[in-house]
Image (tube, rainbow, N blue to C red):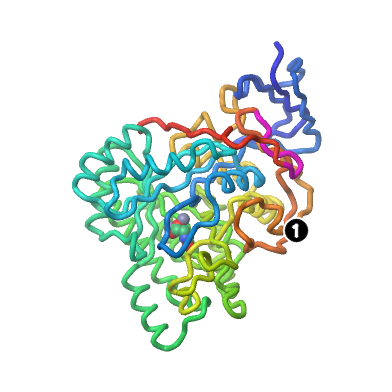
Amino acid sequence: MKFDTIIRGGKVATAVDTFLCDIAIADGRISALGDGLGIADNIIDAQGKLVLPGGIDSHVHLDQPDTPDVVMADGFESGTRSAAFGGTTTLLPFCLQQRGQSLREAVKDYHAKADGNCYVDVSFHVIITDPTDHVLGQELPALIRDGYTSFKVFMTYEDLVLKDYDILRVMAVAREHHANVMVHAENYDAIRFLTERLEAGGNTAPRFHSNSRPIAVEREATHRAISLAEVADISITVVHVSNRQAMEEIRRAQSRGLTVHGETCPQYLVLTASDLDHPGMEGGKYVCSPPPRDKESQLACWEGLQQGVFQLFSSDHCPFRYNDPRGKLTQKGRSSFRWVPNGIPGVAARLPILFSEGVGKGRIDINRFVALTATNHAKTYGLYPRKGTIAVGADADIAIWDPGKNVTITHDLLHDDCDYTPYEGLTVTGWPVTTMVRGQVVVRDGELIGRKGSGEYLQRPAS
Ligand code: URP
Ligand code: ZN
Ligand code: ZN
């Protein structure tokens, strides 16, 4: 048989196995694995390379509305382009319901933003901010039936926070219709109280962002989120976990038999609160929530990844330009950390950081790397086995890695529309040199080959 493409001579790794074999691709799917597979229009030589499932990043923010004076740096074009440069082939960004807006309308608007603009495949989570009776009784069940099977609720942020009562109501819908609930766990009232006290004392520089959201704020909300999930009798995913106490809450819940998934992100492995302490407003480049903590918290996050407390490693890519009055340097942001837009970019840096710091430094093996960055995301969010693995019949979403390539991360390598990376100057070993989505090369050797619009929306099954 003649194939479209054969990837020859690479070392293939999945979430469970590592083996030498060739991969034959036809019509965008993996057709065969083995030796001497025959002929193809394109032969890709992967000798000395690692051949991995393309990354799936199930926590990114693209073109998400913020306050009127703030604009997100990346939309679907630049966000999916940057993903491809970092070896990621599927993104799950968040469709935000603005208060007063119908969910259906929010989803329709978000599709319009994505359509024709993507370089990699996408599917949407929905952020629920206004759980009216109509939203929970009609709109949400209908959307779940249409494959929008995961949604995020917030325990903080003025415009997003839900009361415990409303979180329970959302969870009840998720239980009835078999959907996933992701929780942003930070205690809103405690943050508000601390923020007011800090500001009253004249402590308004970006570094005080981390003082306004100490570990106790996250631990308490993590415990409460898990308790609410137990009351509602559903599984949840606690996203962007930053420290040991929150991680231990999840571990304890798991050991009690509850299905609680944990997610952490690169910022909690390689940044600390001291990064917010740059002179002037520069610390704003590292303002995200929860904030990066300390070295001991980094160790705890590694432990969570190594011991299976965390199943997901995502970027929480939430990009705002630094040198921009509609980004980190808003007029209000200059007056207090409270107004510095929360979030940092990371969609392209995610995989190289975990590969280098994790696999390269012997903290995790390559199979756990694949599980944490691709397979578990596909399984959690209903995309498996089409996505997240290398197997006959799966989409040919593949990243070919040069495991020995030394790269010092600089913003120009990442190809997003932000104007900085919080990981500037970090040297990594191992880099994705070819990224392929459904059999088509999107990025090769630092060059964009793919066509805007070739990325597709992934309809997920109803449950
Ligand atoms: O600071 C962050 N993480 N901003 C993004 C929004 C969120 O909470 O995920
Ligand atoms: Zn969040
Ligand atoms: Zn986020």
Please, which residue is most extreme toward the bottom here? Answer: 201
Provide residue 302's location: percent of width, then percent of height: 57, 58
Provide residue 404's location: percent of width, then percent of height: 79, 48
Q: Count up the numbered dots.
A: 1
In the foreground, 158 or 177: 158
Amino acid at dot 1: Thr
Position above or below: 273 against 289: below
Q: Where does the magenta region start and end?
A: 440-447
Instruction: Judge whether residue 241 can be spotted in this image.
Output: no
Provide residue 249's location: percent of width, then percent of height: 40, 60
Instruction: Say whether residue 108 is left or right of residue 272.
Output: left
Instruction: Say whether residue 234 is left or right of residue 60.
Output: left
Please, which residue is most extreme toward the top here? Answer: 1
In the foreground, 392 or 322: 322
Please, which residue is most extreme toward the left here? Answer: 133
**Location of the N terminus (image quadrant):** top right
Position above or below: 128 against 462: below
Q: Looking at the image, in which quadrant does ligand 2 appear?
A: bottom left
SS at badge 1: strand
Q: In which quarter of the image is residue 421?
A: bottom right
Provide residue 124's location: percent of width, then percent of height: 43, 42
Position above or below: 308 against 420: above
The chief SS type of the magenta part is strand
Residue position for label 1: 408
In the foreground, 238 or 192: 192
Q: Is residue 445 magenta?
A: yes
Residue drawn at x 61%, y 24% as measured from the top left: 28
Position above or below: 200 against 142: below
Q: Is residue 457 magenta?
A: no
Q: Quadrant of residue 35?
A: top right
Instruction: Say whether residue 133 is left or right of residue 180.
Output: left
**Location of the C terminus (image quadrant):** top left
